[in-house]
Image (cartoon, helix red, strand yellow):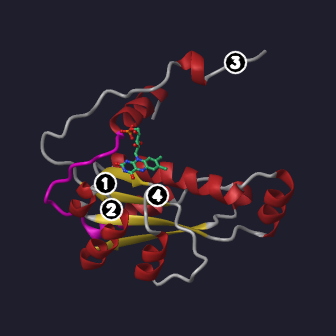
Amino acid sequence: MDLKELESLYLKRQSCREFSDMVVPEEVVTEICRVALLAPSAMNAQPWKLIAVMGEKKDELVKALQRLGMNKFASKASAAVCVVAGKGNFLTQIGSAFKENEFVKNDLGILTAHLTLAAEAAGVGSCILGWRDEEKLRSILGLEKGAVIPEVVVLGYPAEGYPVREKKRKPLKDTFALLK
Ligand SMILES: Cc1cc2nc3c(=O)[nH]c(=O)nc-3n(C[C@H](O)[C@H](O)[C@H](O)COP(=O)(O)O)c2cc1C
């Protein structure tokens, strides 16, 4: 794959907010997660777990992602993939403490990006949902009290005719610098 092909994947990947009735098969969801988990992490600590939720459990979980009319579209998603934080390893914990760099948080963001792009490459739409009732999510997922779930990514096939929107991004001069 060259950069142009990669760019076209990036341009096609968008937050999908209208899903079709067709359910993404379990195997496809699993494959997307497997590929996403090739993401890099500080000291290769892989401080994460992806928990894919489908079926009735997904219907229950999605309610914890909706509030004040937000994220209604998530009800039609085939799966909700929860990005769950792990502890990192000894070195990344030391590194985070001394360098004021939250490695685990960064690693989870990178994993989430890989997940959305892997989904796109599999022809599956995705949307990262930042708003969530973490307490409810923990209880539905059967996780302990301190578990951190910074992101949930809903997956589904885009509704027929769902348009590819033009990307609205800040001009390069505001977000990129080249120093010599
Ligand atoms: C951390 C994070 C949280 C987000 N939360 C939501 C959300 O709760 N609901 C939603 O519809 N979109 C959510 N988004 C999607 C952004 O609005 C979207 O990525 C941004 O507007 C750029 O559009 P694009 O993804 O279509 O390129 C979230 C994105 C990120 C990275």
Residue 115: percent from left, percent from top: 45, 54
Q: How crowded is mark 3: few (under 14 residues within 10 Å), some or many (20 or more)?
A: few
The numbered mark at residue 35 is 4
First to last magenta residue range: 13-30
Between marks 3 and 4, how big is the CA–CA gap?
A: 32 Å
Report if residue 17 lies within the magenta region.
yes
Left or right: residue 68 compared with residue 86:
left
Q: Which of marks 3 and 2 is nearer the N terminus?
A: 2
Q: Which mark is residue 178?
A: 3
**Crowding at label 1, few (<14), some or many (≥20) Cα neighbours within 10 Å?**
few
Which amino acid does the dot numbered 1 rest on?
A: Met
Which sits in the foreground, 107 or 27?
Answer: 107
Dividing the image into 4 quarters, which one contains the C terminus? top right
How far, Cα to Cα, is label 1 from label 4? 29 Å
Q: Of label 1 and label 4, which has the lower sequence position? A: 4
- Label 1 CB sits under 8 Å from any ligand 1 atom: yes
- Give the residue at x 24% y 55%: 73
